[in-house]
Image: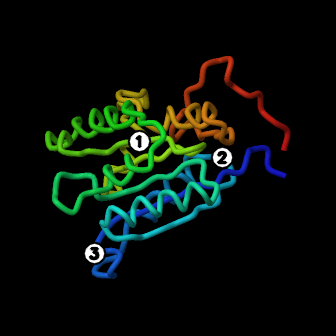
């Protein structure tokens, strides 16, 4: 038995062209790779590659929450173009909006490009699941989740994933433990669980 709680995580790549096979999807492998490095918990992934269709996105989010996902990460469809409808589809299934995640994602993006203000990523809670829209590019996904460090490895801008484990604690999900070398989770001292024997 693992010393860490198992977790089911939904990952959804939203792209008309990738879902039609015009090009190879890069979002799902990027999410799998980063989460595999960042989390010590045993992870079961539930993956979907779907087109930029609002009703389909909302239905897929509901499906993954109902399947027992404690966390759902989406990639793609968050810009201002007509087919970018991921935020609207996400808000449509929300019990609560968590605006701090979107605010921080744009702060991270602005360290690289002024067009980060065009991104519309949102995060919401549905039931006992946290749903977060991420950018579409693998490099941006990692930067957004992990944050930025200086040459000495000290955080310059905190990544959004530092707040994810405690958020999931608060909504009744499993206790997520991160690899501090990738992304150190922050919890108040009263919420830190002592290490469990394997």
The residue where tag 3 is placed is 17
- At which x and y percent is residue 31? 46, 57
- At which x and y percent is residue 139? 33, 53
Say whether residue 56 is left or right of residue 79.
right
Given residues 166 and 88, the one toward you in this image is 88
Task: Identify the image quadrant of the C terminus.
Answer: top right
Q: Which of marks 1 and 2 is in front?
A: 1
Disc 1 residue crowd, few under 14, some 14–19, many 20+, Cα 10 Å: many
The residue where tag 1 is placed is 123
Disc 2 residue crowd, few under 14, some 14–19, many 20+, Cα 10 Å: some
Say whether residue 129 is left or right of residue 77.
right
In primary-sequence order, the first of circles 3 and 1 is: 3
Give the number of the disc on residue 40. 2
Question: Residue drawn at (33%, 38%), measured in percent from left and top?
Answer: 105
Disc 3 residue crowd, few under 14, some 14–19, many 20+, Cα 10 Å: some
Residue sitting at the far bottom: 21
SS type, badge 3: helix
**Vertical comparison of 68 with 161: above or below:** below
SS type, badge 2: loop
Cα distance, mark 1 to mark 2?
A: 23 Å
């Amino acid at each position: 038995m693992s010393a860490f709680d198992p977790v089911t995580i939904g990952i959804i790549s939203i792209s008309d062209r990738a879902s039609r096979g015009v090009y190879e999807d890069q979002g799902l492998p990027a999410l799998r790779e980063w989460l595999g490095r960042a989390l010590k918990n045993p992870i079961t992934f539930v993956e979907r590659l779907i087109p930029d269709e609002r009703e389909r996105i909302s239905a897929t989010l509901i499906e993954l929450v109902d399947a027992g996902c404690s966390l759902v990460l989406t990639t793609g469809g968050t810009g201002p173009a007509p087919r970018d409808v991921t935020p609207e589809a996400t808000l449509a299934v929300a019990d609560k909006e968590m605006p701090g995640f979107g605010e921080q994602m744009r702060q991270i993006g602005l360290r690289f490009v002024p067009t980060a203000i065009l991104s519309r990523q949102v995060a919401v809670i549905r039931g006992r699941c946290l749903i977060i829209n991420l950018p579409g590019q693998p490099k941006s996904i990692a930067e957004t989740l992990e944050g930025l460090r200086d040459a000495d490895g000290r955080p310059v801008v905190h990544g959004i994933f530092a707040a994810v484990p405690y958020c999931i604690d608060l909504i009744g999900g499993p206790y997520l433990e991160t690899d501090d070398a990738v992304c150190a989770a922050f919890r108040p001292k009263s919420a830190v669980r002592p290490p469990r024997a394997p």
